[in-house]
Amino acid sequence: MNASEYIASGILEIYVLGGLSAEEAAEVEAMASQHPEVQEEIHRVEAAYEAIAQQSSVAPRASLRGEILNNIAPESKSEPQESIEQPLAKRRRILPYQLGIAASVALAVLSSGAALYFYNQWQGVEEELSEVVAQNQEIATQYETAAQRADRLSNDLSIATSPDFQLITLEGTEVSPSSLSQVYWNPTESQLYFNPGSLPTPPPDRQYQLWAIVDGKPVSAGLVDTADQKLLAMSVGISEAAAFAITLEPRGGSEAPTLDQMYVQGKVIKS
């Protein structure tokens, strides 16, 4: 415990009031000898209690001094009267009720010190708790993300391995020779899923569009977002098609494909 914490503990107030054991008092005196600020605090507490005693004192009636001297005079005739007056003048005693007031003040100071100590401790615990809660929330978020990814992969795997879906590989054209994409098509249920594969990221004002060639004519099968590499469920169901292709169109799509911007294409193999 450093000097500041020791002062804030309230032990110095109890020391000044004489409420410590000899061992505890020795500890206080050792701290005072090592830390000047502790010694200064002891002097300050002593001065504060002395001021409280002075303010709480009640002036005795004028005749009280004579009555006291008369009562003790017969027992001390051999000693000069000044030997009695000198101790009274040198040191004013703190009466019991004054000590009680000082003790009350000390208790208040001690309580304040204890309250401050426990408040600081609680602040530390609260900060640690906030950190733990934040960590748990982050872990929960990561778990939720991982769970969603696992569910998505499981769904993708079930589609890719299902005998109901036909895999059509779309290979790159002269526009993008290295591109490769996939279509999973269930013509019976008119279900269509698209895997962007290695399509390059389009400019912000452009968007890929999937086309199905039906009876020699292109039919839009939906817009493609390549930001998330997963099987994309296309909104338009296709029950018949001879081929599929991807073109790069203005964002929002086009009514007809831009043929010179065809990135990948693939024919449907009849089983």
Image: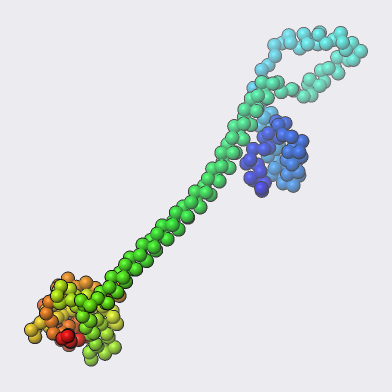
Q: Position of residue 118 (x, y in %)?
A: 56, 42
Q: Position of residue 51 (x, y in %)?
A: 66, 28
Is the residue 8 above or below the residue 79 in the image? below
Is the residue 69 above or below the residue 112 in the image? above
- Nearest the viewer among 83 and 167 is 167
Give residue 164's quadrant in the image: bottom left
Instruction: Tell me: 191 left or right of 149.
Output: left
Which residue is drawn at the image coordinates 13% and 82% (left, top)? 241
Q: Position of residue 149 (x, y in %)?
A: 34, 68
- Nearest the viewer among 177 and 96 is 177
Q: Farthest residue to the bottom: give it.
A: 174
Is the residue 84 above or below the residue 163 in the image? above
Which residue is drawn at the image coordinates 56% and 38% (left, top)? 115
Q: Quadrant of the C terminus?
A: bottom left
Which residue is drawn at the image coordinates 70% and 42% (left, top)? 38
Q: How many marks?
A: 0
Which residue is drawn at the image coordinates 90% and 15% (left, top)? 79
- Nearest the viewer among 266 and 199 is 266
Instruction: Tell me: 80 left or right of 131.
Output: right
Residue 211 visible somewhere in the drawing = yes
